[in-house]
């Protein structure tokens, strides 16, 4: 086979190569027979080259060519010739030439394919996901997957290039670690040598990177695999990759500026997109009030507006009740020392132009209401603006309650004739904002507001800062960390941490891109006493804190430097750069939506011997009772 080793790739030959003898290796992408001549599109990772087989001239070649089927792996020897002008294919990078074959060797045959690679007009989306994952090696041959895996590689390289140039060290941390509560459920690895003991796979390298700061490696990063055993929801993967970063002797501004620099470099280098030097900033509170989300999509407006000023003068009892109940709940919580926001009535004005001039039908509004209800809204009130600029009036829905205030409302909310106003009221301001925020996101998609007018791609980054440090878990009746337990409470709250946890803001930040949370991070606690106070507030007693995190607090006693970090999700980053909506599209071997891998049928049962060695026996759910 030595003589059939490739001299060139299938994406390499150009007009200037005409006359050369070459050997190409690759896969039969397509084959067409045209009266005595066969055209083979030969594909490899670099491109596709047209191979021409003159069957009438060479009967041996004709017989071989007749045998070829899609995805046979072959070697072709022949000479490069320019394609006649009319046949030159501008869309193919090798379109100026073709290779006239005089030798073909079949390197390996292929079974009949479960789906066509790059079937015309369908792309990989046509094949069902389970099939794509079962035959992932075939799916990965598609042009889309090839392009995205290439992009992923380039992005990883750009990340490393930029960070290393900035003086960061890439340091690996273990994948077998101590199980520590870090938010999600751990994946466990039983120890053979120590019966009854387990390693855990890291949910992130969080504690190790903080210990590396204590060890003096003041700029660390790692393109790190993280493992979280969470129930399948949305686009989650049991294992995913993040660009884990930590720095010493820094404040929030340093981390934000570093991340902006990194993103700017990666976008420019890999997809040629110039990002602004500084990203928009919003406080958590503003993001919730204006967009009803802590990961707002800023590619469009449709901001949430305060509708409560118009409630008292209206005769609309449902809105009045929401506000008064909210007030009562706030006071009751305050009596328990808990800070909760009161009720809220919020509105969105959808300009007539955004709806394409046509108005929403009752049915469409009902659909939006159903969506709001998923986010616990009690309902979605609506009315349409009508009349004229001088004499506005409302029509439909709840209009009769607000008719008298039409002039004021339209003026203050900027509603014009033909616009639709959607309103959510709730005794919990958070629920009102979140539900209307979900409606806003749906409108953004439905009305295609996320698309840029010139069809180009848009990347709207934003920092969300000043998050609350704690969230109250109603079900368990206790405070828990909003990000994780190692984040630094802002200085001004240190005296009152225990007294009013709900009011404490942390030095936390999220980076948001086009409505996705791309990164989270924080300035960390580096003082063991403060760390122990946080453990106390989230209900981890000192003995438990000592047992689970003692190694961290102990390390902090040896001159731990102030430090902070961030971790952009690498799969998500590549997904957004690739214009995809699922991270499975940018991971070579993802699990399916049920945390399984159809290709190697994982997870799988193991031999009794393996279980014995691990001192384990399995209790199947039905045997439990
Ligand atoms: N370890 C955190 C996470 O995975 C990120 C960070 O705080 O740096 O969300």
Image (cartoon, helix red, strand yellow):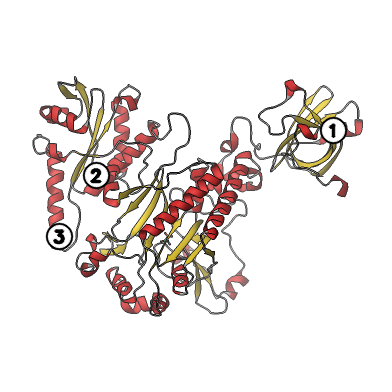
Q: Is residue 482 visible?
A: yes
Q: Is residue 199 above or below residue 280?
A: below
| Numbered badge on residue 173 | none
Q: Regarding ligand 1, which quadrant of the image does it lie in?
A: bottom left
> Which one is closest to the eye, mark 3 or mark 1?
1
Answer above or below: position of 163 versus 441.
below
Which quadrant of the figure has residue 404?
Answer: top left
Q: Residue at horizontal 14%, vertical 30%?
A: 408
Q: Are marks 3 and 1 in contact (CB under 8 Å)?
A: no
Residue 625, image x and y in percent? Answer: 42, 66
Indicate yes or no: mark 3 CB to ligand 1 under 8 Å: no
- The residue singled out by tag 1 in the image is 19
Residue 617 in the image, given as x and y percentages of width and height: 53, 71
Which-is-in-front pick, marks 1 and 2?
1
Mark 2: few/some/many CA within 10 Å (<14, 14-19, 20+)? many
Circle 3 sits on which residue? Answer: 334
Task: Tell me if 505 is positioned left or right of 136 in this view.
Answer: left
Q: How far is disc 3 from disc 1 in space, using C-alphas?
A: 85 Å
Which residue in the structure is indicated by mark 2?
432
Q: Earlier in the sequence, mark 1 or mark 2?
A: 1
Give the x, y percent position of residue 187. 49, 65
Mark 3 Cα within 10 Å, few/some/many (few <14, many 20+)? few
SS label for mark 3: helix
Q: Quadrant of residue 363?
A: top left
Q: Say which residue appears at 32% left-offset and 78% top-offset.
A: 542
Secondary element under disc 2, as helix, strand or loop, is helix
Point out the tag, 3 or 2, that comes first from the N-terminus.
3
């Amino acid at each position: 086979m030595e003589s059939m080793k490739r001299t060139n790739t299938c994406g390499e030959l150009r007009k200037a190569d005409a006359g050369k003898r070459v050997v190409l290796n690759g896969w039969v992408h397509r084959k067409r027979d045209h009266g005595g001549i066969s055209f083979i599109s030969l594909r490899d990772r670099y491109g596709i080259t047209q191979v021409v087989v003159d069957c009438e001239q060479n009967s041996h070649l004709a017989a071989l060519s007749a045998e070829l089927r899609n995805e046979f792996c072959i070697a072709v020897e022949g000479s490069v010739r320019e394609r006649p002008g009319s046949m030159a294919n501008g869309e193919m990078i090798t379109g100026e030439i073709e290779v006239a074959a005089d030798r073909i060797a079949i390197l390996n045959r292929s079974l009949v394919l479960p789906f066509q690679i790059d079937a015309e007009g369908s792309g990989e989306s046509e094949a069902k996901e389970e099939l794509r994952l079962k035959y992932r090696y075939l799916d990965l041959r598609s042009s889309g997957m090839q392009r995205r895996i290439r992009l992923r590689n380039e992005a990883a390289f750009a990340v490393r290039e930029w960070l290393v140039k900035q003086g960061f060290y890439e340091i690996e941390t273990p994948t077998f670690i101590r199980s520590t509560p870090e938010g999600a459920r751990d994946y466990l690895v039983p120890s053979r040598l120590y019966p009854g003991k387990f390693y855990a796979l890291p949910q992130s390298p969080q504690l190790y990177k903080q210990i590396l700061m204590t060890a003096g490696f003041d700029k660390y990063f790692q393109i790190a695999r993280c493992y979280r055993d969470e129930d399948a929801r949305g686009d989650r993967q049991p294992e995913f990759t993040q660009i884990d970063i930590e720095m010493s002797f820094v404040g929030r501004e340093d981390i934000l500026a570093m991340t902006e620099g990194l993103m700017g470099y990666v976008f420019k280098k890999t997809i040629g997109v110039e990002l602004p030097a500084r990203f928009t900033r919003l406080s958590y509170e503003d993001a919730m009030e204006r967009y009803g989300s802590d990961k707002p999509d800023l590619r469009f407006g449709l901001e949430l507006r305060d509708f409560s000023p118009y409630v008292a003068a209206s005769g609309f009892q449902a809105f009045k009740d929401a506000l008064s109940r909210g007030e009562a709940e706030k006071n009751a919580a305050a009596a328990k020392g808990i800070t909760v926001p009161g009720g809220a009535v919020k509105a969105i004005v959808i300009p007539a132009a955004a709806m394409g001039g046509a108005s929403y039908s009752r049915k469409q509004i009902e659909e939006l209401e159903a969506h709001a209800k998923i986010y616990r809204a009690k309902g979605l009130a609506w009315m349409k603006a009508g009349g004229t600029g001088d004499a506005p009036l409302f029509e439909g829905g709840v209009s009769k309650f607000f008719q008298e205030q039409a002039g004021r409302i339209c003026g203050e909310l900027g509603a014009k004739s033909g616009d639709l106003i959607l309103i959510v009221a709730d005794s919990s301001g958070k629920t009102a904002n979140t539900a209307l925020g979900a409606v806003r996101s749906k409108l953004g998609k439905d009305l295609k507001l996320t698309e840029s007018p010139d069809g180009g791609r848009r990347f709207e980054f934003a920092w969300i800062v000043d998050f609350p440090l704690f969230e109250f878990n109603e079900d368990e009746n206790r405070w828990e960390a909003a990000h994780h337990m190692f984040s630094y409470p802002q200085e001004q709250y240190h005296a009152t941490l225990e007294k009013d946890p709900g009011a404490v803001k942390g030095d936390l930040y999220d980076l948001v891109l086009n409505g996705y949370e791309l990164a989270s991070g924080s300035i960390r606690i580096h003082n063991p006493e403060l760390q122990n106070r946080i453990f106390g507030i989230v209900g981890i007693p000192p003995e438990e804190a000592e047992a689970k995190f003692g190694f961290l607090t102990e390390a902090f006693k040896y001159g731990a430097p102030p430090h902070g970090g961030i971790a952009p999700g690498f799969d998500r980053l590549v997904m957004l750069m690739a214009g995809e909506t699922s991270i499975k599209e940018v991971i070579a071997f993802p699990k399916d939506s049920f945390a399984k891998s159809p290709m190697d049928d994982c997870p799988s049962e193991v031999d009794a011997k393996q279980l014995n060695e691990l001192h384990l026996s399995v209790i199947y759910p039905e045997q439990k009772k």
